[in-house]
Image: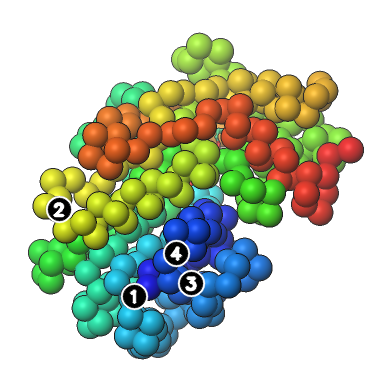
């Protein structure tokens, strides 16, 4: 029996692949390698495939049968908020279409367990700063919409053919489990600051006049190794056969850290001061977004092991191994 990890060569997926291999699972990775890197999956089997491509459903079905797949962990998706606003139909085609292909193949191959990468983006700009899973969900961009639709699709498949599923709603993921598994993209706060410092340019803070303790946005930062571990806990829960009361879980810590605190933390980690530019607010940023972690702690017995210090240390350490270390 094996676990199929779609998007397993990417930043978060590869952490989960390593954890699965470490505990002796057979793993088959399906990845189009558009962002993923085959060197990150050790000796897991790789099927190079865009899950949203024409004909992907048949190839996924064949892989599930050939590899005796018992569960799917589905990371494969596009995840850039701004890009999703510019290319909404492509996001629907990729994220919703890819998931539909995967779940159709699962139905046909009789694979009954699914873990889906959802996102705190499903909450949009929530009416409260610490969000519980059941509050109103009004995503404010196509990326968040495709994630919420993904959860609905899985609930529909549960009704239609008994799919067992979990949607993990990730908060702000950063850090690295090892130096070779750092986030290669420069799209989020921590890598964006490191990138600016390496170039000798000022780091950017978008907005200093929010109604938050220091005026900058507050987020719930989660170490990628803790996030990987949440997938393992979810997998064990799904495959235990226990009756499932809940399907969606925040993967957060319940604690908030401001943009300024992250920037100051990086100064500590790098060991020197660097220039910072305070800019206007970035459109669409909620002032504060923190995940209530009670449900995942209670039901999956999961809680974050690492704090912001370890997140920043590990992100910096992996950055230093990359192509452009900070001198
Ligand atoms: N920020 C800066 N300077 C930068 C980069 C970011 O001030 O150079 C600020 C942003 O304005 C925001 C905070 O840092 O206030 C975090 O921004 P990120 O882009 O790192 O993350 P977001 O909270 O915007 O979004 C992330 C993921 C999304 C996911 C969302 C859910 O990138 O995919 O968390 O909370 F949907």
CA separation, marks 4 and 2? 23 Å
Q: Nearer the viewer, residue 86 or 110?
A: 110
Mark earlier in primary sequence (2, 1): 1
CA separation, marks 2 and 1? 20 Å
CA separation, marks 4 and 1? 11 Å
Mark earlier in primary sequence (4, 3): 4
Q: Quadrant of the C terminus?
A: top right
Mark earlier in primary sequence (4, 2): 4
Query: Contact, CB < 8 Å: mark 4 with mark 2?
Result: no
Residue 143 visible? yes
User: What residue does disc 2 label?
Assistant: 242
Q: Residues within 10 Å of mark 2 (few under 14, many from 20)?
A: few
> Which colour style is shown?
rainbow
- Label 2 CB sits under 8 Å from any ligand 1 atom: no
Q: Which numbered disc, 4 or 1, marks the residue closer to the eye? A: 4
User: What residue does disc 1 label?
Assistant: 1
User: What residue does disc 4 label?
Assistant: 24
Task: Where is residue 260? Give x, y as percent.
Answer: 62, 21
Tell me: residue 109, above or below residue 97.
Answer: below
Dot 4: what SS?
loop
Q: Is residue 320 left or right of residue 15?
A: right
Query: Contact, CB < 8 Å: mark 4 with mark 3?
Result: no
- Label 4 CB sits under 8 Å from any ligand 1 atom: no
Tell me: residue 83, above or below residue 291.
Answer: below
User: Residue at position x 29%, y 63% from top?
Assistant: 114
Q: Residues within 10 Å of mark 3 (few under 14, many from 20)?
A: many
User: Residue at position x 13%, y 46% from top?
Assistant: 245
Which mark is on residue 29?
3
Mark earlier in primary sequence (1, 3): 1
- Label 3 CB sits under 8 Å from any ligand 1 atom: no
């Amino acid at each position: 029996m094996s676990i199929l990890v779609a998007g397993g060569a990417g930043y978060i997926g590869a952490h989960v692949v390593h954890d699965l291999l470490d505990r002796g699972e057979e793993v088959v990775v399906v990845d189009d390698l558009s962002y993923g890197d085959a060197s990150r999956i050790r000796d897991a089997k790789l099927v190079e495939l865009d899950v949203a491509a024409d004909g992907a459903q048949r190839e996924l079905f064949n892989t599930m049968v050939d590899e005796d797949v018992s569960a799917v962990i589905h990371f494969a998706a596009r995840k850039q908020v701004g890009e999703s606003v510019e290319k909404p139909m492509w996001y629907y085609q990729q994220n919703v279409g890819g998931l539909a292909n995967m779940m159709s193949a699962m139905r046909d191959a009789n694979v009954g367990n699914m873990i889906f990468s959802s996102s705190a983006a499903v909450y949009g700009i929530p009416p409260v700063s610490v969000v519980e899973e059941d509050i109103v969900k009004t995503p404010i961009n196509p990326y968040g919409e495709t994630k919420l639709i993904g959860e609905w699709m899985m609930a529909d498949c549960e009704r239609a053919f008994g799919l067992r599923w979990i949607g993990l709603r990730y908060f702000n993921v950063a850090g690295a489990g090892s130096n070779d598994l750092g986030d290669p993209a420069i799209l989020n706060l921590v890598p964006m600051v490191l990138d600016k410092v390496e170039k000798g340019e000022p780091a950017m803070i978008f907005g200093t006049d929010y109604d938050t303790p220091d005026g900058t946005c507050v987020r719930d930062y989660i170490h990628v190794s803790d996030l990987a571990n949440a997938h393992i806990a979810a997998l064990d829960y799904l495959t235990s056969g226990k009756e499932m009361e809940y399907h969606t879980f925040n993967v957060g810590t319940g604690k908030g850290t401001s943009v300024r605190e992250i920037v100051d933390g990086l100064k500590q980690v790098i060991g020197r001061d660097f220039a910072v530019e305070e800019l206007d607010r970035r459109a669409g940023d909620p002032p504060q977004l923190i995940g209530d972690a009670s449900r995942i702690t209670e039901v999956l017995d999961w809680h974050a092991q690492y704090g912001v210090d370890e997140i920043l240390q590990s992100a910096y350490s992996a950055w230093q191994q990359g192509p452009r270390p900070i001198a």
